[in-house]
Image (cartoon, grey):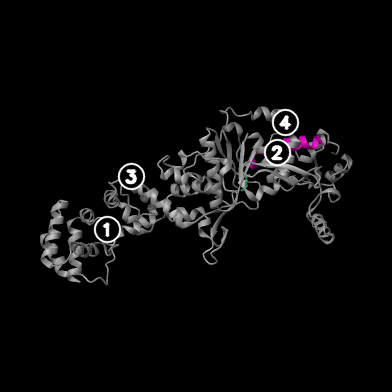
Amino acid sequence: MRNGLDKDLIARVLGAEPKWTIAELEAKFPPRDLPDGAFVTRFAPSPTGFMHIGNLYSMLIDYKLASQSGGVFMLRIEDTDTKREVEGAVDLVKNAIRDFGFKYNNDEIYGPYFQSQRKDIYRSVAAELLARGLAYPCFLTADEMEEIRVKQNAAGFATGIYGEWARDRDLTADEIIAHLDNGEVPTIRLYSTGDPNKRIFCKDAVRGSISFPENNEDLVLIKSNDGLPTYHFAHLCDDHFMRTTHVVRGEEWLPSLPLHYQLFNMMGWTPPIYIHTATLDKIDAETGKQRKMSKRKDPENNLAFFLAGGWPTEALIEYLGNILAPGYEEAKLKGAVKTFWDYEMKPKKIPMSGGLFDMKKLEWWAKEYIGAMPVADLVTAVTNWANEYGTDENKMQVADAKYLSAVLGIERDNPKRVRKDFITWKQTLENVAFFWDKLFVPAIDYEYNRDVLRAFLETYDPADDKDTWWNKIVAIAEKTGIKNGDVAMNLRVALAGRTNTPDLYSIMSVMGGDMVRGRIGRVLNG
Ligand code: GLU
């Protein structure tokens, strides 16, 4: 440990007096009054203008653990890297949270929730570390650090500011004052007393206890250019004072865990429970091998892809839920639970290595989900999608809600035989496009039996009930000497332009007499 700095020097080093003592902060952000076992989690994105599937995966864990335990799920914006920040990125995050149906509970007491607005808190904690000789002001310039790095590389040492390389770690008060008088603005660095020959034991809720070499790097806690904290220091201050119980984050943070334990230990605070999630993998279409999702190569890595493509967000959640809570699908198929929200997720069962994301599997979940939807909800979902993302044709399809509801209502009245041919809102509209004359594409190479079509028109009455209608088809079959099914097929292709459709009688009823006559007439006159 080094000598602590006195109050005046701390204020000069930090550029302002610390606003609170640690005791005051503890009182300002009291432990939460929650039932035993309640999880307090947070989604903590950096606003970089992009929400990827890993964000959703991690947020789903956060939200599920908090909601199933009667806890709290927060949204914290980690906007400390002003260079990487993108305009509108916060709205993008909030819209994604809304679109996927999550709700966060940012209780004012524990705010603010933008890290850029928490400078007073970071400064107050840094002041404590400076006073106790656990942190120090460092005046190394970028050029000087680069020189150090080059020397370290040449000599085969690990790079970084540590031990002897940390030029300023033992500056006296007078030396610090001389730098400050010279107009230099310091970074605040950790005064690390860790010894990499010793090991520190850290816990991950899924991986269990993991030991790492102790950290000996004097890592930056507060940056000189903007007075904002690094991720590490913000994590310490925020997750302590927001009373986070469980930190769910990507496994790329695992190597920083010894540092985070070191920081919590220095402050005498209990670290949160960590859950480091594995990245999601996919099977590469070209090589057939499992690999990480890539921002550059895989459009499905971006959440916007699913929204624009009209994937039911609930299906994506169901599918991701099944990846992170193995056993859910089985429970659902058995009828023990209806949705992922009813299924109890166990943190220990979260996969530790590459969960596999497969669009084909997602299709299965999507078909199941849409198949079970009441038609009114399906109409709303398809309409909302078309109005936000659809083409002019899609918008035309949803303009008449009554007609759309009749179209989408076909074969949805028998819960035992649910339709499984709708996958996305977009594909649903494509699938039923033949119900609109403007979008209907006739089958060009089908060999119609024109006698059958003519005979149908002769006796067709749109007011017929299903039995009467069917008896007429049977009569036509007898008269023309072909099978009932072939009669129906001729009609089906004339009406829908394809051989595979749901119930033909329902199609005719929804289309109405004029459209049916028009379509058949078109074949006969064509
Ligand atoms: N802002 C960090 C990230 O996006 C958050 C990690 C965490 O959840 O602690 O990776």
Q: First in sequence: mark 2 or mark 4?
A: 4
Reading the image, the residue beneath label 3 is 374
Residue 327 on the magenta span? no
Circle nearer the viewer, 4 or 3: 3
* Residue nearer the viewer, 39 or 209: 209
Residue span colored magenta: 115-132
Reading the image, the residue beneath label 4 is 22
Asked if the residue at label 2 sits under 8 Å from ligand 1, the reply is no
Q: Position of residue 262 (x, y in %)?
A: 74, 40
Query: What secondary structure characterizes most of the magenta part?
Result: helix
Asked whether the residues under the numbered discs 3 and 2 touch, taking CB atoms below 8 Å apart as contact, a structural biologist would say no
Type of residue at label 3?
Answer: Pro
Quarter of the C terminus within the rendering: bottom left
Residue 117 on the magenta span? yes
Circle nearer the viewer, 3 or 2: 3
Type of residue at label 2?
Answer: Tyr
